[in-house]
Amino acid sequence: MRPVLDDWPVAATFAFLWAVATLRGGATYALGRGARGASARTDRASRLLARPEVARAERVVGRFGAPAVTLCFLTVGVQTAVNAAAGVLRMPLARYVPALVLGAALWATVYVTVGLAVLSAVWGGHPWLLLVALAVVVLVVRVVRRRWHRDLAG
C-alpha cells in the first residue's frame, strides 16, 4: 500500500498556496500603502508622518525590512502586521516583491509538506471523511450566516 500523501497533487497545491499567499501579502501591502496615502491628507497625521522618527523607520524598513517580510511567512499571526507595516512605511517595491515571493514560497512549502501530511494522517485515506468534514463546515457556515442575517433584520 502506497502512502496517502502520494495521492495529493503536490505541485498544483503548492502553486495554489503560493498564489494565495502572494496575493494576500501583496494586497495587505497595498492596503497599508493606501492607508498611508489617505492618512497623509489629514493635518494631524501629516504632522506625525513628517516626524524624524517616521523617516528613520522608513529608512530602516527600506534597507532591512525584506528579511522580516520573508520570515514573517513562517509565523502565525504576524504576517498581516509585517506586510501592512511594509506598506505604511513605504518599503520600496524592488525590495518588497522579491521578499514577498520568497516568503510565500516558504509558506506554501510548509503547508504542502507539514499541512498535507497532517491532513493525510487525519484523513487516513478515506475520502468520505474529507467529504463529511467539508459538509460540516458548509452546514456551520450556513447556520451562522442565517443567524447573523436574522439578527441584522431584527
Image (cartoon, rainbow, N blue to C red):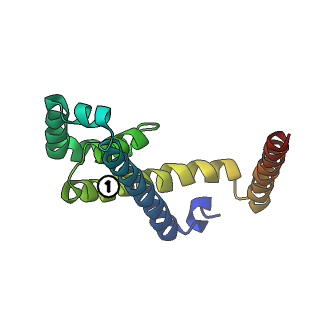
Front position in the image: 139 or 110: 139
**Looking at this view, is 109 or 58 the one in front?**
58
For image coordinates 33% across by 39% down, the residue present is 42
Q: Does residue 34 lie above or below 5 as drawn?
A: above
Q: Position of residue 142 (x, y in %)?
A: 81, 51
Task: Indicate the amino acid at tag 1.
Answer: Leu
The foreground one among 24 and 57 is 57
Outermost residue on the front side: it is 43
Q: Quadrant of residue 81?
A: top left
What residue appears at the point 25 percent right and 54 percent down from the top-left corner?
96
Answer with left or right where residue 55 lies relative to residue 45: left
Q: Secondary structure at mark 1?
A: helix
Rendered residue at 40%/59% (across/down): 22
- Find residue 23 and report its horizontal and vertical position in percent: 43, 60
Give the quarter of the figure containing the N terminus: bottom right
Percent across and percent down for residue 124 are 69, 53
Number of numbered discs visible in the structure rendering: 1
Residue under numbered circle 1: 100
117, above or below 127, in the image: above
- Where residue 126 sits, quadrant-wise, is bottom right
Residue 77: give x, y in percent of width and height.
46, 36
The quadrant in which the C terminus is found is top right
* Residue 140 sits above or below residue 102 on the image: above
Identity of the residue drawn at 56% across and 65% down = 6
Residue 62: image quadrant is top left
Q: Is the residue marked by circle 1 packed among few (<14), some (14-19), or many (20+) residues within 10 Å?
A: many
